[in-house]
Amino acid sequence: MTSLITMNIPALRSAFSATSRRTFSTSRAKLDALVYLEHRDGKINPGSLSALTAAQKVDGKVVGLVAGSENVDSVVEEAKKLPVNKLLLAKSDIYNHHSPSTLAPLLKSIVENDSAITHLFAVHSAVGKNVLPRAAALLDTSIIADILNLENGGTEFTRGIYAGNAISTIKSDEPKKVVTVRGTAFDAAVAGSSEVAVEEIAAVDAKDHAPYVSSEMTVTARPDLGSASRVISGGRALKSAENFNQIIEPLADKLGAAIGASRAAVDSGYADNSLQVGQTGKIVAPELYMAIGISGAIQHLAGMKDSKLIVAVNKDPEAPIFQIADVGLVADLFEAVPEITKKIDT
C-alpha cells in the first residue's frame, strides 16, 4: 500500500534551524552467516573454503561449524586459522559421515537459536546437495543452490540455468537463507596467523534414517579432479578404455594433471564415473583444461567452460568445443596427442 504525505516545507525548515538542529541516523542490522565446513580424512574440503569466501560478502559476522569426531582435531586446528569470527565444534560420532538425518537438525538448531544468523552456507558438493535442502525444509525456507555470486549484503544471488547458458538473478526476502556455493566460482579463503576460539556445542538428538554402511574410495596419486590446476579429459572418440589409458594417462603424468572424462566416455565404460566432468558430474575451473576427443555437448561445457585456458583436440572442425576453446587443434588425436606428450619436457 502506498500513501501520500503532504508536508509544510517552511515549517519543516524552521524545525531544523541552526539552533535546533538534530541528527538522525539509520543503521541496518548485521546479518551473520553460518558456514558448514565439510571435511574428510582430517582436512577441510577446498570447496568449503570457497563457501567461506562467499559468506564474507554477507553484511555481518561469519561463524564456522565443524561437526564429527573422526580426525576432527586436525580439522579444528586448520579451521581456527580461517577468517571466521567464531568457530563451533559439534564433536560426536553421529556426524562422521555427513548424514542429512543427523546433520540437518544440527544446522537448524544453530540457526534458530541465534537470531543474528540469517544465512547458512555450504559448498555445492555431494554432501552439500544432500544436507542443505533438508536443513532448508526444517527451517521452512527455500534452498538457493549452486550460486555463482551474491550481492546487496546477501539478498541477491546469481546462478546458472539452462546448463549454464543463461544466468538468473534471485532476490530473496526470506528471513533465513540456505545457500550452496559453486566451489569454482569463488576464491578459497586463506588461513591467517591468528587463531579464533573454539566453542564446543552439544549434539542434537536425531535418528539417522539412513545409517552409514561402508565406503569405497578410488585412490589415485594424481591431483583431485575437483581442485586440480590442470585437467586432461578424454571423450568417446578414444574408442576404448585401453586407448583412454594409453593416450590420456601419459599426458596427464607429464603435466601433473588430474584426469577427467565426458559423460559419453563414462557411459561407454572408458573411465570411472568419479571422473565425469559436466552438468551431471564435477564442475571444474582449472588453469588448464585439455579436451581430447570431446565434441563439446552442452552438458559437458557446463562443467568446464570457466577454465582459464581451454585446449581442444578433435578431428571434426565443426565440433562445438572449438567455440569456447582458447587453443584448438583439428587433428587425429591418436597421432597428435602422443606427439604433444613427447614434446613436453619432463
Image (tube, rainbow, N blue to C red):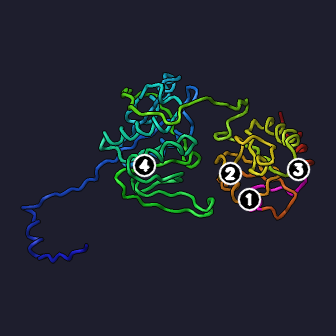
Q: Where is residue 255 in the image (x, y as percent from the top left)?
A: 77, 38
According to the picture, the residue beneath numbered tag 1 turns out to be: 297
Residue 189 vs residue 103, the one in the foreground: 103
On screen, residue 11 above or below 91: below
Instruction: Give me the disc on residue 278.
Output: 2
Q: Earlier in the sequence, mark 3 or mark 4?
A: 4
Mark 4 is on which residue type? Ala
Instruction: Give me the disc on residue 333.
Output: 3
Q: What's the residue at 69%, 56% (across, down)?
A: 299
Classify mark 2: residues with Cα within 10 Å, few (<14), some (14-19) or many (20+).
many
The image quadrant that residue 194 belongs to is top left
Q: Where is residue 183 in the image (x, y as percent from the top left)?
A: 57, 45
CA gap between label 1 and label 2 equals 9 Å
Mark 1 is on which residue type? Ala
Q: In the rendered structure, does residue 329 fall within the stretch colored magenta? A: yes
Q: What's the residue at 52%, 39% (across, down)?
A: 48
Q: Where are the magenta residues, as a range?
A: 320-333
Q: In the rendered structure, does residue 227 fall within the stretch colored magenta? A: no
Residue 178 vs residue 51, the one in the foreground: 178
User: Secondary structure beneath disc 4?
Assistant: helix
263 with respect to 27 (left or right): right
Q: Is disc 1 in contact with disc 2, using a CB cutoff of under 8 Å?
A: yes
Mark 3 is on which residue type? Leu
User: Secondary structure beneath disc 3?
Assistant: helix
CA gap between label 3 and label 4 equals 49 Å
User: Secondary structure beneath disc 1?
Assistant: loop
According to the picture, the residue beneath numbered tag 4 turns out to be: 137
Instruction: Give me the disc on residue 131.
Output: none
Q: What's the residue at 86%, 61% (across, down)?
A: 316
CA gap between label 2 and label 4 equals 28 Å
Callout in the foreground (2, 3): 2
